[in-house]
Image (cartoon, rainbow, N blue to C red):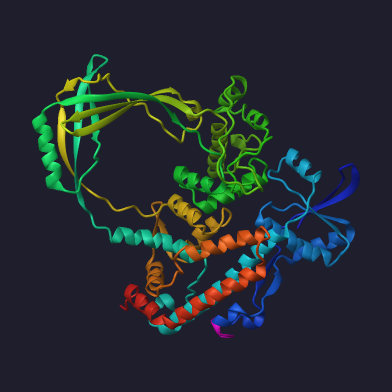
Amino acid sequence: NFGFNFDYSINGQNCEMFFTSLAGHLMGIDFPKELASWYSCEPSELFYKPIVKIVKFPDIDKTLQKYSKMCQWLVLWLDCDREGEKICFEVIERCIRINKRMRIYRAKFSALIPRDIIYACNNLGQPNENESFAVETREELDLRIGCSFTRLISLHLQNKHKKRADFVKRTVSYGPCQFPTLGFVCERYFEIENFVKENFWSIKLQLTKDLDNKPYPVDFNWKRNRLFDEVCCYMIYEMCLEEGEATITSVTGKPKSRYKPKPLHTVDLQKLCSQYFHMGSETCMNTAEKLYQRGFLSYPRTETNVFKNGTDFEGLIRNQTVDPNWGNYANDLLTQNKFRHPRNGNKNDNSHPPIHPTKYASKNDFENRNEENLYTLVTKHFLACCSDDAKGFETIIEATIGDEVFESNGLIIHELNFLEIYTYNKWNAVSIPKFVIGEKIIPSKLDFITSETNPPKCLTEKDLITKMDKFGIGTDATIAQHIKKIQDREYVQKVSQEFIPTTLGLALYEASCKMGLNLTKPHLRAQTEKELVQIANGIKTKEQVVMEYLNIYSNLLSQVENEKNTLDRAIIKYFPLK
């Protein structure tokens, strides 16, 4: 890997700096070679067998060793999140083997721009070992749990179902995040499959008045909304028909606002890219990472949606004033007193700010359409955060026929504000004629409507990300990986932007449910993630959490072992012999 050296000064101290790079995690963990064969031990023994550390990139390791012999300081410029802290300690472990006297420092930064880099260099701190321990815990649990369950399930299916071509030498992979993610997709699938449509009835009222000297029909919604009793609803409808006219009983108006968005964090970025561009979460994160590495965006893996005090909003907005599409809007924020401080969200990881543009990018700076779309979204989102809410005036009309109340709403938009730039959101004005309290109007329409309930739709990527975030499956940095993995494993497939479980995915889900286990439910993994936070905060130790969850999953593995017949029945159901 490459290396640079140059003269530099840190806090007035002159030095020669040697700079090199990594390629993600320098080290990994695995079982020793003697356990590589799936027949080397019982799957349950993998919970307690020794594990070994492996250097994943020997050439990079050699470069680090070379520089360690030459240098007195080790300054760690890794991503400022838990994974970055883990990589810090991987580098430290390899470097101090060569030079135990090295002084170790951590650079904290959120954007690859001169201001942030210089500030980080002049304010060096220490790496956080507790955050590294949290990642170590997850890695060990995922390795032991994943390998033990995968070997047990795969070997059983290969031996028991040799006549089914789908399982000859097939690896059926288990992961503590994979299966709950599959579970969300399957739960929705069965909700749809088991949905029973139900009829309901409602009454629709239309009153016509003049607007700009022309008849203008206005639809009113029934305050009861709907009834599931046809006879009862029809009796009310007949009473309305007998009454013959509607009376305006209330005309009220109030200011109405459409609130600007909160600052952008990773999960919301993934959801918005999926919603607006049909961009998969993995593509979204890879694209954001590339823009970050070229200095156009702040660090894209953040749980924070609150800007800290002292953020240079003026400088960040001024960067955008040269753009031909939104430059005038950005300039008006600065020169026309239109800047408003962003709303505060309720999430703060105390590591990185919300995602925002750190320098201007023109069309020529983008390598593909995904980069352009994502950068445009982040920039417009940031400018919208720095704007005022959209403002309007809502009119609410109530009409009664007998004892039944109907309502209609009109909207006048006074100021679009953030909606001028945030074109992804729409807020449409609704014209409404003038109504006067007490006036009586013969309906132009009074309809008895028969409808039926509809099943929910299959999960989109946005829906799936929302569920994973809500139930704590994965982190902002790993959600995309889990979604990709259940597709790669052929447990689900994406059809017209919706996730559909495959027959294998359905079989695994059904078997897990009928075993009475929580393998495809989110609660166990969500609790594990909470424990990892406690390790990162120094409340619990790695050893405590590893032992606790290995005991839990060991018991679950024993139950799966005892319930293999349940798995067989599911396989026979979904993979019948031809």
**Could you tell me residue 228's position as x and y percent?**
19, 48
Identify the magenta region. Answer: 38-43
Question: In the drawing, does residue 250 fall left or right of residue 562?
Answer: left
Q: Residue at x 60, y 42 (%)?
A: 355
Rendered view: 401 above or below 534: above
Q: Which of the two residues, 174 or 204, is positioned nearer the viewer here?
A: 204
Q: Where is residue 401, by image quadrant?
A: top left
Q: Which of the two residues, 149 or 171, is positioned nearer the viewer here?
A: 149
**Could you tell me residue 66's position as x and y percent?**
84, 62
Q: Residue at x 89, y 49 (%)?
A: 16
What secondary structure is the magenta-colored segment mainly? loop
**Could you tell me residue 509's position as x and y percent?**
40, 68
Question: In the drawing, does residue 61 fall left or right of residue 525?
Answer: right
Rendered view: 419 above or below 17: above
Rendered view: 42 above or below 439: below
Rendered view: 361 above or below 303: above
Residue 154: tell me if it is visible: no
Q: Residue at x 23, y 54 (%)?
A: 197
- Residue furthest to the right in view is 14
**Could you tell me residue 110's position as x and y percent?**
68, 45
The quarter of the image holding the N terminus is bottom right
